[in-house]
Image: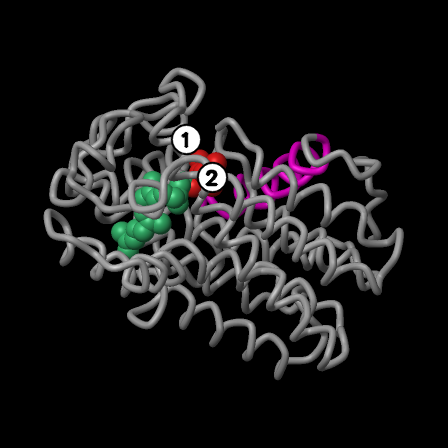
Amino acid sequence: MTHQDASGGDPIRLLADCARRVEAALDNALATSALAGEHPRPERLVAAMRHAALGGGKRLRPGLLLATARLFGRDDEGVVLAGAALECIHCYSLVHDDLPAMDDDDMRRGRPTVHKAYDEATAILAGDALLTLAFDLIAAPAVHTSAAVRLEASRELARAAGHGGMAGGQMLDLASEHRDRSEQEIRLLQAMKTGALIRYAARTGARLADASGPDLERLTRFGEIIGLAFQLADDLLDVEGDAARLGKAAGKDADAGKATLVALKGVAETRAELADLVAEAEALLAPFGARSAELVALARFVADRDR
Ligand code: GRG
C-alpha cells in the first residue's frame, strides 16, 4: 500500500504524520499477546516498553528515514517498519541514558522516566528488549523485497548503535566528564553518540528506496550534516531551552561538567555554524530540485527547533 504524503513539505506536519504511522507500527509490535512461537510476554515488561516507546517524542529519526525514502519514490509500510526499528534503538538509548548510573534523569518527554515509573531493573530490561525488537522489525520481509538489502540494513543498524557508534560515543562521553575536551574529541563523540543513528536514518531511507550509489553517498553526507546540526541545536537548547517545553531538564551539560561545542565556541559562533550546515544541506540536495523540499524543511527544523 502506498501512503499519500499529508505533510505538503511542512516539517511539523511531516513529523506528525510520521509519528502517527510509526506509533501504529510500534503499538502493534508491543502488543501484550505473544506471537506464534513466542512464550507469553510479561505484562510489566511490555508496559515499561510501551511507556518508553509510545506517546511521545518528535520521531525525528524515522521522519528522516521516511522522507529520504520518499525522495526516491518509496513510501509504504515496509519503510515505516524500518523507521520503527530505528526509533526502538533511540528509545532504548533514552531509557538507559536516564538511569541513575548514567544521566540520572526523572523526566523524559514530559513524563516520568521508565525507572521512575517502574523500577531500575525493569527499565534495564525494557531497554534491552527494545534494542532486540529493533532487529526483529528491520528483518521483516516488508522492509525490502531483497534479503540482501535487509541484511545490509540490519548490519548497518547494529554498527550505528554499537560500540563503534552510539554506545561507543556514550562511553567516550562518560569517560571525559569533568575534564577538558578538545573540539576534535567532542566532534568525534557526538558523531558517534547522536550522529550515527541520524546518519543511518538518511542512508537507510535511500538504500531501501534503491537509490543509486552516488545518491546513497550524497544522502549519507546529508545525514551527517543533520546529525551535527541536531547536536549543536541540542547543546544550544541545553543552555537556552525551557525545561517545560523540552519535557526534560535543561542545563544538564554544565551541571555535569560537560564541555560542549557551545561551551567551547560560544552561542554566536554555534549559530553561525548551524546556518552553514543548513546551507550545505540545501546545496547537497539541490540536484533533486523541488522533490527535496521536505528534506530541506526537515534540515531547517532540526537547526531551528525549540524542543
Ligand atoms: C545508553 C547506549 C546508550 C546510549 C545513550 C543518545 C544517547 C546515548 C543518550 C541520550 C542523551 C541525550 C539526551 C543526548 C542528547 C541528544 C538526544 C539524543 C536527545 C534526545 O533526542 P530527541 O530530541 O528526543 O530526538 P525525542 O524525545 O524527540 O525522541
Q: How many labels sit on residues?
A: 2
Disc 2 marks which amino acid?
Ala
Disc 1 marks which amino acid?
Leu
Mark number for residue 233?
2
Q: Main secondary structure of the magenta part?
A: helix
The quarter of the image that holds ligand 1 is: top left
Q: Which residues are magenta?
A: 13-33
Q: Report if the beta carbon of the residue with label 2 is closer than 8 angstroms to ligand 1.
A: no
Q: Is residue 277 magenta?
A: no
The foreground one among 103 and 258 is 258
**Can the viewer see residue 164 in this picture?**
yes
Q: Residue visible at 88% across and 57% down?
A: 289
Query: Where is residue 218 drawn, in percent x and y?
Result: 68, 70
> Is residue 186 found left or right of 226 in the rendered image?
left
> Is residue 178 found left or right of 265 in the rendered image?
left
The foreground one among 205 and 255 is 255
Mark number for residue 237?
1
Looking at the rendered structure, the secondary structure element under dot 2 is: helix
Q: Residues within 10 Å of mark 1 (few under 14, many from 20)?
A: some
The foreground one among 207 and 178 is 178
